[in-house]
Image: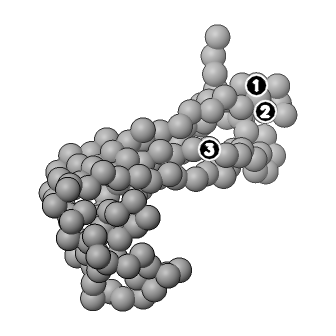
Amino acid sequence: MGFAVLSDETVIYLRPVIVGIAELGPRMPTGLNLGTARQVGISLVASKQLMEKVADKPQPKEDEHLRRMDIWEFIDIVEKKAGFDLVRYRGSDGLNYLVRLEIEPNVVSRTLEYRDQLGNPIYHVSWSEKIQVQLERG
């Protein structure tokens, strides 16, 4: 599991999961070209002070909070670690492949105008994604 420690003392956890693998195109001299279907689960732990600030705020309805850019502020990431998932895939060519998905948080913003269902401020996270495919030897 990856994480980002923010300058407001919130810790955001990121858990990428490969939920599907597909073979794309014909086999090449280096093996199969593999694509992934993926999901990223995000959870967070905010400080008690931040939770008190949003205690009387509403939960957003659908995406109303995403349409109001004036309520968002960028929050610095002071420490981070990429999260990853690793899956073994047996290809149609009879070879075993290791497929690794890595997610690294890059930019975080926060609004104190709304709260989530657990009483935390609402955060929005942007991340970079890296997929590695290699033959499993052995």
Mark toward the start of the polypeptide (3 vs 2): 3
Q: Amino acid at mark 2?
A: Gly
Mark toward the start of the polypeptide (3 vs 1): 3
Badge 1 is on which residue? 95
Taking depth in this image into account, of 71 and 93 the one nearest to the observer is: 71
Let me know if residue 44 appears in the view.
Answer: yes
Q: Residues within 10 Å of mark 3 (few under 14, many from 20)?
A: some
Quadrant for residue 47, please give it. Answer: bottom left
Residue 42 in the image, given as x and y percentages of width and height: 44, 53
Quadrant for residue 34, please give it. Answer: top right
Badge 3 is on which residue? 18
- Residue 88 is left or right of residue 62, and the answer is right
Residue 3 in the image, given as x and y percentages of width and height: 33, 45
Badge 2 is on which residue? 91
* Residue at (50, 51) in percent of width and height: 41
The disc at residue 68 is none
Secondary structure at badge 3 equals strand
Let me know if residue 123 appears in the view.
Answer: no
> Which quarter of the rendering shows the C terminus?
top right
Is the Cβ of the residue at disc 2 closer than 8 Å to that at disc 1? yes
Does 91 sit above or below residue 78?
above
Extreme-front residue of the structure: 56
Does 96 sit above or below residue 40?
above
* Residue at (44, 79) in percent of width and height: 60
Q: Amino acid at mark 3?
A: Ile
Q: Amino acid at mark 1?
A: Leu
